[in-house]
Image (cartoon, helix red, strand yellow):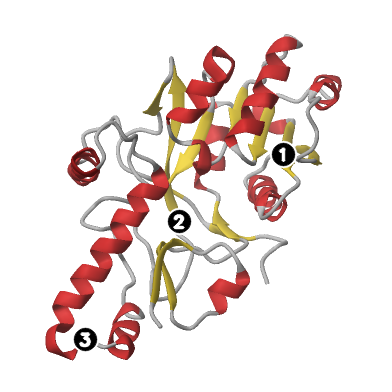
Amino acid sequence: MPDLRVSILTNERYDCATCFAAQALEPGVITDAAYQFYAEQDKQATQSAAFLYLNLGGSPALARSFADAAESAGFGVKIYKGIESSEFNYAPFVQELKDEGITFVSFTGATQQAVRLADAMAQQGYKPDQFVVTQTQYGPELAAQGGANVDGALAPVPHPAFTGDNQQVALYTQWLQRVKPGASPTTFGLFAWSATRLFVEQAVALGGTLTRESLVESLRGVQKWTAGGLHSEMNVGGKQSFTCSTVVQLQRGEWRQISGDGYDCGKLVRTSVAR
């Protein structure tokens, strides 16, 4: 049964011979492009870094891979710590950040907890030079829930910002409004659009020879998929992680691309959580 989805995050799904993702990724293997960008912006800040994560689901492994990739880019990682989902008092974690002189903070987890951390930092008058969240937070929810406390947050995404002039991104957002007026575009919605487009293109190309088997075989040959320029190149068939991304920043409630035109590309880092 062909399985064409937004992303693959687990080894079990990665091992599935008929499973593919529009946002191709080998678990535990990530690009260091964003970390190179952060260092270029403020190298001093990256020398005292903390990687906090929600101790739930895939967040611990993902945060570990982020920390490893950052270290490979020359970061000085001083703190790597999980926060239980049942924890509501983030003050002790912020105090530790202050005591250790942390200037770069990365948080991996749900938006609700990212906001809780930002609120605790604001309450203690602590503001790191760089505060990084994940692709999950790229959307209106972070600003809506966090307000001024999350302003300035950074996030790496493997596609142009929704506020830019990319024609394929505009096409996705246009059709989103047609089918659900008032809905906000999301990074996962964008890749769902990409996955659907890939299926349609493959099905049309196969024509009368379209079967489950022929579709799977055809998908294995897709190596530089961009959905017409919607996102960075994805090796869908080879299930290899992407190397290029952009960096967006939350500025007065709106995400803006700050990494310049096009993509920043780096090297793939096989982290300690990779097989």
Q: Which residue is mark 2?
A: 243
Q: Which residue is mark 3?
A: 210
The quarter of the picture where the C terminus appears is bottom right
Place of residue 33 in the rendered image (x, y in percent of width and height, measured from the top left): 50, 46
Q: Is residue 76 above or below residue 93?
A: below
Q: Which mark is residue 51?
A: 1
**Which marked residue is nearer to the observer: mark 1 or mark 2?**
1
Q: Earlier in the sequence, mark 1 or mark 3?
A: 1
Tell me if mark 3 has few (under 14), some (14-19) or many (20+) residues whose alpha carbon lies within 10 angstroms of its own: some
Callout 2, which amino acid? Answer: Thr
Place of residue 89 in the rendered image (x, y in percent of width and height, measured from the top left): 81, 25
Q: How many angstroms separate mark 2 from mark 3 (CA)?
A: 32 Å
Q: How many angstroms separate mark 1 from mark 2 (CA)?
A: 21 Å
Foreground residue among 271 and 1: 1
Callout 1, which amino acid? Answer: Phe
Q: Is residue 123 above or below residue 179?
A: above
Q: Which residue shows up at 43% across the image and 29% down it?
A: 140
Q: In which image quadrant can residue 79 be found?
A: top right
Q: Is residue 115 among what the camera can see?
A: yes
211 vs 95, left or right, is left
Q: Is residue 15 above or below residue 137?
A: below
Q: Is residue 232 among what the camera can see?
A: no
Tell me if mark 1 has few (under 14), some (14-19) or many (20+) residues whose alpha carbon lies within 10 angstroms of its own: many
Foreground residue among 228 and 189: 189
Q: Which residue shows up at 67% across the image and 16% down it?
A: 127
Q: Secondary structure at mark 3?
A: loop
80 vs 57, left or right, is right
Q: In which image quadrant can residue 61 be found?
A: bottom right
Marks 1 & 3, CB-CB < 8 Å contact: no
